[in-house]
Amino acid sequence: MKQHNFNLLLTVLFCLFIGGMFLGSLILPDRAFSQLENRNLEQAPKISLEAIDTGKFMEDAEDYVNDQIIGRDFWVALKAWSERLSGKQENNGVYFAKENTLISRVDTPSWEDTPAQGDTPAQQGLQTRVGYVNALVDNVDVPVYFGIIPSAAEIWSDRLPEGAPTADEKAIIDRLYSAAQTHTVDLYSALAQHKDEDLYYRTDHHWTSLGAYYGYTALMDAMGLEAAPLDESQKVTVSEDFYGTLFSSSGVRWLPPDHIDRYISDEGVTVTAYPNGTPEPGSLYVDSYLKVKDQYSSFLGGNKPLCVIETEHTGAPKVLVIRDSYADSLAPFLTQNFSEIHLFDPRYNLNSVQEYAAQNEIDSIVVLYSISNFTAKDNQLFVLGR
């Protein structure tokens, strides 16, 4: 009888818990954005016959419930703790690596396009993507440089858990460079030579300002220009409490924060941003972001379709960088060698690269991507051929 009462009590408590979670999630207003995860949260899906028939409605509904459940931040952290206590070395595609480092797994991409199969959409392979880069070479009359930035999973592979699967990034980069009809930038060697230094943030997927500097030296070497030396005396630490994207997505909450450094002054630099297609005054550094979760966006104010930096070196060449967010922390170093730096992000800018280069009298073009973004399905690289 006592066992029966105990089981009944557990059942009642469980039902109360589930009911409370359901009512709490139903009553509380939906959140549009998670500061801790630094991403937009799913909103209530719209009902349509097509969405129900294809099963998309149920998928969207599941994502919505997962994102809007009451206490989501607590449950995400609890899952990461349980994974760690169970001996697992990964959560949500992020490895719990040595030296208090979080490293994102990189999956091996297909070289050829993958055709659609059932509900699985077709995927572009690397051959098609490098083909877009080659199309750009054919469309412009200025030299084109192509650089792929390896991730921490490659350069800091010795920090990964033993046997942790991840892509052979060097082999992927070598194959891309072999197929490219461009000048190539040996970013791999530049970073690998300094692998014992703080090249990447421990809680974020981006390279640090120091890593960006070594990337800058590799780019200058490829372009036949002289890289300015790194002046450590100019280094300014602007944040000591940065937690990045991997901290957010992994659920890990037990690591110490990163710090953000700067080496280049913004004096004598004019920045014009085009967040919505129209020019607005910008800045090389936007300190207001240092007060929020997304501190990496303090470089140039975050992702923008187009950003133009003008320097005091009026006699120097103009460069157009087709890029992702890694270029935000690289751009300050480029101000030492160019009169104008045009930062063009195809993820948000579908204008013709060929026309833009001609209209702005660009002297050289750099296609610079992290390996994860170059292989991502939504990088919109097709604009290179326009």
Image (cartoon, grey):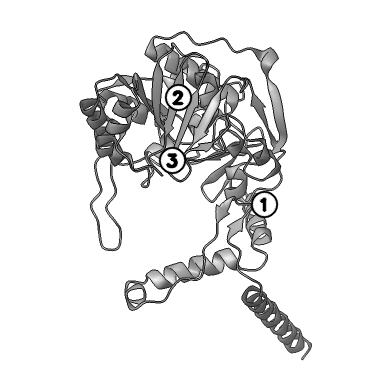
The residue lying furthest to the left in this view is 138
Q: Quadrant of residue 67?
A: bottom right
Disc 3 crowd rating (10 Å Cα; few below 14, some 14-19, many 20+) is some
Residue designated by label 1:
85
Residues under numbered marks 3 and 1 in contact, where contact means CB atoms less than 8 Å apart: no
- Of the two numbered discs 2 and 3 on the same chain, state the one appearing first in sequence: 3
The answer to whether residue 73 is above or below residue 224 is below
The answer to whether residue 156 is above or below residue 204 is above
Disc 1 crowd rating (10 Å Cα; few below 14, some 14-19, many 20+) is few
How far across and how far down the image is residue 176, in percent?
A: 30, 29
How far across and how far down the image is residue 275, in percent?
A: 48, 43
Q: Amino acid at mark 3?
A: Pro
Residue 219's tag is none
Q: Secondary structure at mark 1?
A: helix
The answer to whether residue 349 is above or below residue 262 is below
Residue 341's tag is 2
> Label 2, label 3: how many angstroms apart (C-alpha)?
14 Å
Which residue does the image show at 27% across and 31% down from the upper left?
354
- Of the two numbered discs 2 and 1 on the same chain, state the one appearing first in sequence: 1
